[in-house]
Amino acid sequence: MTRRIAKLLTHPWLALVFRLYIGGLFVYAAMYKINYVGEFSNTIASYRLVPYWAVNGLAVFMPWTEIICGALLILGVRVRSAASIIMVMLAAFTVAIFVNLLRGAPISCGCFHTIEDPISWWTVLRDLTWLGMTWHVYRFDAILQADQLFLGKLGRLDS
Amino acid sequence: MSDSRDAYADDFGFAPDDAGRRDPERRLFHLKSLYDTSRELADPAPPQEVLRRFLPMAMGPLGSTFGFAIFLHTKGLAVESLGLSETARNGLAESGEILIRKFFPEGDAPPARAVIMAGHHLSEDPNLAHGTSMVAALPVDEEALALLGFGTKIDGTEYGDDETALLRGMASLLTAALRKGCSEACINDLNHRLQHRNRQLEEVLGQAEQTREKLARRAFELQALFETASELSALNEPDAILDAFTLSVMGTLGYSGGWVAIYGHGENDMAVSYRGPNPEDRDRLASGFGRNEILARFVDLKDRMPHAHQCRLLQDKEALDRLPVPTDAAVLFTLDHGWRGAVGLSSPLSGAPLSESRKQLLASLTTTFTATLGNARQLSMVRELNSDLTARNIELQTTLDALTSARKEIGLLTEAKEGILRLVRGEVARVERASWLDAALIILAGMVLGFLFNLSSPSGIPIIPPHILDAPPAMVAPAKARQMVLDHKAIIIDARPSDFYLQSHIKGSINLPKNLFNFVYSMKISSLAPDTPLVVYGRTFSRRYDEDVARELEQLGHEHVLVMDGGIDAWQSQGHEVEP
């Protein structure tokens, strides 16, 4: 039973579901941030973790990194690299939320919209869940990858 | 006259004695006998003939019953007799030399004049003929001696002084005649020798002439060989050598027509050179018929068939007639590699057939020709081989160049393949694992796209805060600010977002966040006098809310806008009131 559960939890199809979900989530989240970069800049500043001179730059660049990584996950291109970057970003978000929860900062998450519910431990749990999903993708994803469709065949040239 | 007659008589043994004077007739007879004898011996003759003539001339006046004469010369012994038997004559012939040596002992000088001996005691000598009564020994010369012997007189008397004197005179005549005869014989002998030598000389001269002619002929042949060899050696092409040799052999041997033909193994392997009046002969030589007829002559030779670089004269007239063209002289020859041929000559200019020496010359010329032709053919083969070798070398070089180019190309392709494989392996590996390069590329792409979009978007923001390098506004310490508030001289403005203001703020402060600046300003601050001191606070690690709001207020005309140093944290740390 345990093996069966383990096999089910580590199944590539589950990784594909997680991959499409996380990819779509990041594309969706980035769309808002790209269109309202000023507001996203204030959100980053509200966390009080990024230096004054780097807040605007991070607000400009990070949404595009998110949307690229999300798109790569959806398409199945460079899945592990994209998943790695997403894991790093989710880990940073989680740490930022965790720190501000400890500070008692009255800020919202700012993940999808400017006006949201204030951050909470549920927010941390949610981000950790997403982080786990991304790790699952990194570890077990193996099907419907555009990379494999081409490079998998090229790889047989070496044999 | 009397003195001369006496001298003459003395020379011939007639001394003028009284007896002589008493018998003039006898003396006249003796003189006449001497005269007759001298006349008889006047003609030169050999000693044998002289003796034969002398004996009757002496025996008559002497009245001898027989007479003999022995003549000893270096050439031999001659005996002549008259009135003697054959036996007695043979005995004289056997004992002649002994008799001579009795009168002329060896080692003694011969007497100057004839020695005459007479008497019956002579008959006792066994070597003399029986009855010999008088002998006379005559020293003819240093190499010739003579002995005369006479038998008894017919009248039975002994020889007297007159006879002795007469014999002395006759001996003188005989001596002179014998000397003359010896000289004549010597002269004749010399003549014979001279004639013999002349004949030998003529023979030698004839032989020398023949030798000279042979040498001239040989020189001509060698000259012809040399010129032919020189002419042929300057040529390298086989066809040119054939033509040159045909003309050369025709000119050398004096023929108006000539041809040379060589044939190989194949039906078309042939070369023909023809000089003559009939062009059809050339076609006949160059035809299969001509080839078969000439090669058939080799078969006729059987075991005498010439080997490689040898030639053989066709001596048989029938064989010459069976050649494909009219030919008077021909030589068959064999080259190397199975090639055979023939040289033919026709219509001699002299009309005479070739002599043996000219035939040998023809054979020698043909040998020279075959050697030169063989060398030319070898040279031609070497040239062809060199040409083939050069072509093969060019082909080989081209092939080597192509191989080298192909090898380089293969090397490049191999390197390209390795590169592609490395790239594929790298790409496959990158697909299967997280790559720093991919991460960097993704982040770089995000930065570039973000920068470009922000640059072109109307809602774009400055990447770097615009007032980061501007001079900070006037600062005020929290204590000073509190005093200014207590003195009702200043208004404290909280520039932080509303959530932070609601969480905690300085008591009595007005929340003026930048996103609501215009609304709040018009409601609460626009009515204040421009010279009212405004103390702004609200700075965090990530945003300088206080500086932003202070600059806005200054731009709206407020003259005393101050930023509180340290913000609410400094204010609170000094124990001042905050709310809620």
Image (cartoon, coloured by chain):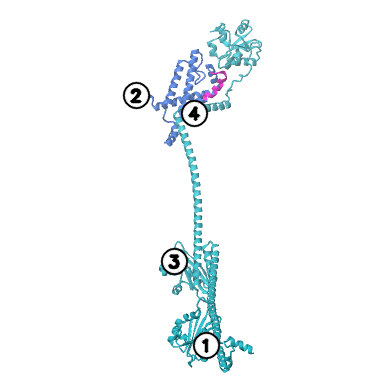
Chain colours: A blue, B cyan
**Which badge, 4 or 1, is on the more N-terminal residue?**
1
List x then y, in percent, for residue B394. Answer: 51, 51
The residue where tag 1 is placed is: B54
Distance (Cα) linking label 2 and label 4: 35 Å
Give the magenta range.
Answer: A50-63
Query: Mark 4 near mark 3, Cβ–Cβ under 8 Å?
Result: no
* Chain designation of label 1: B
**Is residue A55 shown in magenta?**
yes
Distance (Cα) linking label 4 and label 1: 168 Å
* Residue depth check, mark 4 versus mark 3: number of the one nearer the observer: 3
List x then y, in percent, for residue A98. Answer: 48, 16
Query: Mark 4 near mark 1, Cβ–Cβ under 8 Å?
Result: no
Q: Which mark is residue B306?
A: 3
The residue at 55%/67% (across/down) is: B223
The residue where tag 4 is placed is: B438
Q: Amino acid at mark 3?
A: Pro
**Which badge, 1 or 3, is on the more N-terminal residue?**
1
Q: Which mark is residue A3?
A: 2
